[in-house]
C-alpha cells in the first residue's frame, strides 16, 4: 500500500510539474506568418559609394541592406519582400539629382535612404517631393533641409517627403561651442570651412554660439575641398594665437588639415562635426591627432543596448566595410520606411494600394518604433525627435566619447 | 499478473507502529495520537488521497516558485541611465521672499521612461559665474515609469563669468542606475535659453554693457 501511494504521489507530482513546466515554457515566438508573398518593394539608397567619403557611404548601404534582409527574414510585412537598389552619388549634387530621377522612375521604389551630404540632399529633395517618394536621410545635418532657409528666425517645412534620423547642426554646432568654452576652457578659435552646405552651415552655428558664450574668433578661412595642401592656412592658424581650430567639413580634408596645422607648430586641437567622426580621419591626421575632437549624432553605440543586436547582425552579415558613423541611423531610416510600408499594407487589406508612394510618405509622419539608436519618430518638420549628441576625442589612435548630451527643447 | 495488486490487510489488522507499545520513541505521542490513529485507520484511503493532493500542491508550488525567469536580465543588458531619462524644462518659478539677491529658479521635469530606477547624484551647470542647488537635494531616486519635478535654484557669483545670451545652455545631471553611473548634458531648448538669459540680465543689469 505504501509503495502504491508513493507511486501515486510521484505520478501526481510529475504530472503537476510537467503541467507547470509546460506553462512556463510557453513563449511568444510567433512573429510573422507564412505568406505566398509576390510583391517586391525596393528601398533606394543614395550615398557616396566611391571616392573620399565612400567609407561612410558603404556603411550606409550595408546597414540598409541588413534592415531589408532582417524584415524579409521576420516576414514583417505579409506578402512583401524588400530589396535595395544602391546608387553612387560620389558626394556630388548633380549625381545625386540624377540618382533621384532614376529612383523615381522605378515604380517598385517606395522609399529612399540617403544621402550623406546635405549639399546632395538639396539637389534631390524636390525630385522626390514631386513624385511623393519618401526620403529618409541618416546623415544630413543642415537645419535648412527640414526647417527652411530662414530656420534661425522662422521655421517652415518645405518638403513633406523629406525626413531624417540625424540631429541637426542647429544643435551640433552650439553643443561643440558649449563644450569648448565650458569644459575645454578654450577662448580663441580659428574657424575654417569647406564652403559646402554642410561645412559652412556647421561652422556658422558653431561660431554664433562660441561668440555668445564670450569666445573670440581669431580668424576665419575657407579651403578648397579639392586640395590637400593647407600649409598656408596652417601658418595663419599658427600666427593667429588661437587655442583651438574649428573645422566645418569632412574628414578627407580635415585629416590632412589637422596634420599640417600641427606641423606648422600650432599644437592645438582641431574640432569638427560628424563629418570628421571617422576612423579615416585619424589615419589621415596621424599621431598628432591625439586630442582632436568631433561631435557626432547620437549616443555612443556601446551605451545603447538596442545597438548590440545591430552590431552583432552586421558582423554576421559578412559586410566587408565598417558601418561607420551612420550605420545605426541608416538601419533605422530603412526600418522607418519598412514600418511605413507595413502600415500602408495593413490599412489596405494586406495589399499595396495604387498610390502607395503618397500613402507611405503620409504614414512616415506617424512612424514610431524602438530602433538601433533609440526611439525613432519624427516631428512636424521631419526631424528626428530623438536628439542626442556626443563629443569624441582622439585617444590612443581611436575616438573615445568624452561627453554626451540630450536635446529636449 | 492480473493487475489487481497485492491484497490489503483488513482494517484494524495491521501491525502499525503507532499501535505498538513496544516502540519507546513513539509511545510518548501515542496517547495523544490515539484519536488520530483511529481516524487514520477508519479513513486511510481518504488520508492518502489528501496527503497526495497536499504534496502535489506543495511540490507544484515549489517548482512554480523556483522556476527560472523567462529572460533573466543581467547587468550588462540593462540600459544606461542616460538612455532612459528625460529632462524637460517647465518654466521659471519664484524664489521665496528674502532670498539673497541675484538668485532665480527654474522647474524641470525628470522622468525615467524604462529600465531600473535611477538616482540623480548631482545636478550642475557649466558656467563659472553661477552656483546651483536643487530641490529635492541630490541624491534622490526616481522609479521606472515615474517622473518628478525638480526646482533648480541658481545664484550668480560673478557676472563676468556668465553668458549673456547662450543659445543652447544645458544642465549636467549625474545619473546612476544598476547599469552605470554617467554624466549627461540635458540641453533644455530655446525657452530655457531665453529664461536663463533674461534672469542673468536682470541679475547682472549693472554689470552687462
Image: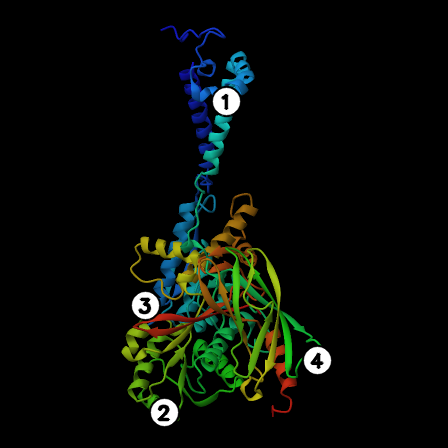
Separation (CA) of disc 4 from disc 2: 54 Å
Quick one: label 1 or label 4, which is nearer the N terminus? 1
Q: Which mark is residue B51?
A: 1
Label 1: chain letter: B
Circle 3 or circle 2, nearest the eye: 2
Q: Quadrant of residue A241?
A: bottom left
Quadrant occupied by the C terminus of chain A: bottom right
Separation (CA) of disc 1 from disc 2: 94 Å
Residue bearing mark 4: B98
Residue bearing mark 3: A50
Name the residue nearer the viewer: B174 or B194.
B174
Circle 3 or circle 1, nearest the eye: 1
Label 4: chain letter: B
Position of residue A8 measured from the top left corner of the image (x, y, whole percent) = 44, 19
Asked if labels 1 and 4 share a chain, the reply is yes
Asked if labels 3 and 2 share a chain, the reply is yes
Q: Is residue A154 visible?
A: no
Q: Which mark is residue A236?
A: 2
Position of residue A120 measured from the top left corner of the image (x, y, whole percent) = 43, 71
User: Regarding mark 3 in the picture, which secondary structure is present there?
Assistant: loop
Residue that appears at 29% across and 59% down? A320
Separation (CA) of disc 1 from disc 4: 75 Å
**CB contact under 8 Å: marks 4 and 3:** no
**CB contact under 8 Å: marks 3 and 2:** no
User: Regarding mark 4 in the picture, which secondary structure is present there?
Assistant: loop
In the image, residue A25 above or below residue B25: below
Position of residue B147 measured from the top left corner of the image (x, y, whole percent) = 60, 60
Determine crowd level at label 2: few under 14, some 14-19, many 20+ residues with C-alpha closer than 10 A: some
Circle 4 or circle 2, nearest the eye: 4
- Number of marks: 4
Amino acid at each position: 500500500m505504501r509503495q502504491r501511494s508513493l507511486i501515486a504521489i510521484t505520478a501526481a507530482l510529475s504530472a503537476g510539474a510537467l503541467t507547470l513546466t509546460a506553462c512556463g515554457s510557453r513563449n511568444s515566438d510567433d512573429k510573422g506568418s507564412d505568406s505566398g508573398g509576390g510583391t517586391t518593394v525596393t528601398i533606394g539608397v543614395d550615398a557616396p559609394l566611391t571616392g573620399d567619403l565612400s567609407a561612410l557611404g558603404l556603411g550606409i548601404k550595408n546597414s540598409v541592406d541588413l534592415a531589408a534582409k532582417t524584415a524579409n527574414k521576420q516576414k514583417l510585412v505579409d506578402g512583401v519582400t524588400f530589396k535595395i537598389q544602391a546608387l553612387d552619388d560620389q558626394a556630388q549634387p548633380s549625381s545625386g539629382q540624377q540618382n533621384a530621377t532614376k529612383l523615381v522612375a522605378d515604380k517598385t521604389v517606395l522609399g529612399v535612404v540617403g544621402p550623406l551630404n546635405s549639399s546632395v540632399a538639396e539637389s534631390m529633395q524636390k525630385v522626390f517631393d514631386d513624385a511623393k517618394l519618401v526620403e529618409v536621410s541618416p546623415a544630413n545635418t543642415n537645419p535648412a533641409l527640414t526647417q527652411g532657409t530662414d530656420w534661425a528666425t522662422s521655421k517652415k517645412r518645405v518638403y513633406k517627403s523629406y525626413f531624417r534620423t540625424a540631429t541637426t547642426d542647429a544643435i551640433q554646432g552650439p553643443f561643440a561651442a558649449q563644450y569648448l568654452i565650458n569644459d575645454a576652457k578654450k577662448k580663441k578659435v580659428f574657424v575654417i570651412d569647406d564652403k559646402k552646405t554642410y561645412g559652412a552651415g556647421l561652422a556658422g552655428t558653431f561660431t554664433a554660439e562660441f561668440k555668445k558664450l564670450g569666445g573670440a574668433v581669431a580668424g576665419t578661412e575657407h579651403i578648397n575641398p579639392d586640395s590637400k595642401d593647407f600649409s598656408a592656412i596652417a601658418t595663419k592658424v599658427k600666427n593667429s594665437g588661437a587655442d583651438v581650430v574649428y573645422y566645418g567639413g569632412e574628414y578627407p580634408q580635415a585629416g590632412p588639415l589637422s596634420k599640417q596645422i600641427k606641423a606648422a607648430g600650432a599644437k592645438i586641437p582641431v574640432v569638427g562635426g560628424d563629418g570628421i567622426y571617422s576612423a579615416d580621419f585619424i589615419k589621415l591626421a596621424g599621431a598628432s591627432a591625439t586630442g582632436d575632437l568631433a561631435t557626432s549624432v547620437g549616443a555612443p553605440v556601446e551605451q545603447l543596448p538596442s545597438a548590440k543586436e545591430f552590431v552583432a547582425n552586421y558582423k554576421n552579415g559578412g559586410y566587408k566595410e565598417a558601418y561607420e558613423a551612420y550605420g545605426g541611423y541608416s538601419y533605422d531610416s530603412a526600418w522607418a520606411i519598412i514600418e511605413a510600408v507595413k502600415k500602408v499594407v495593413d490599412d489596405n487589406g494586406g495589399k499595396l494600394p495604387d498610390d502607395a508612394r503618397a500613402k507611405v510618405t503620409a504614414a512616415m509622419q506617424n512612424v514610431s518604433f524602438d530602433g538601433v539608436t533609440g526611439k525613432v519618430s519624427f516631428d512636424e518638420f521631419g526631424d528626428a525627435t530623438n536628439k542626442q549628441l556626443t563629443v569624441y576625442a582622439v585617444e590612443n589612435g581611436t575616438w573615445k566619447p568624452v561627453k554626451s548630451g540630450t536635446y529636449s527643447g | 499478473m492480473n493487475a489487481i495488486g497485492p491484497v490489503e490487510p483488513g482494517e484494524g489488522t495491521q501491525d502499525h507502529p503507532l499501535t505498538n507499545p513496544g516502540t519507546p520513541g513513539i509511545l510518548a505521542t501515542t496517547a495523544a495520537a490515539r484519536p488520530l490513529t483511529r481516524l487514520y485507520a477508519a479513513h486511510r484511503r481518504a488520508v492518502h488521497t489528501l496527503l497526495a493532493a497536499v504534496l502535489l500542491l506543495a511540490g507544484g508550488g515549489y517548482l512554480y516558485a523556483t522556476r527560472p525567469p523567462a529572460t533573466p536580465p543581467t547587468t550588462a543588458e540593462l540600459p544606461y541611465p542616460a538612455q532612459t531619462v528625460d529632462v524637460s524644462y517647465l518654466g521659471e518659478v519664484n524664489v521665496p521672499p528674502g532670498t539673497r539677491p541675484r538668485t532665480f529658479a527654474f522647474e524641470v521635469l525628470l522622468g525615467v521612461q524604462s529600465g531600473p530606477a535611477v538616482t540623480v547624484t548631482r545636478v550642475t551647470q557649466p558656467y563659472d559665474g553661477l552656483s546651483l542647488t536643487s530641490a529635492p537635494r541630490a541624491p534622490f531616486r526616481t522609479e521606472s515609469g515615474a517622473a518628478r519635478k525638480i526646482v533648480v535654484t541658481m545664484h550668480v557669483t560673478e557676472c563676468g563669468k556668465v553668458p549673456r545670451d547662450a543659445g543652447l545652455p544645458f544642465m549636467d545631471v549625474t545619473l546612476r542606475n544598476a547599469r552605470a553611473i554617467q554624466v549627461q548634458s540635458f540641453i533644455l531648448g530655446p525657452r530655457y535659453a531665453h529664461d536663463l538669459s533674461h534672469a542673468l540680465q536682470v541679475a547682472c543689469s549693472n554689470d552687462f554693457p
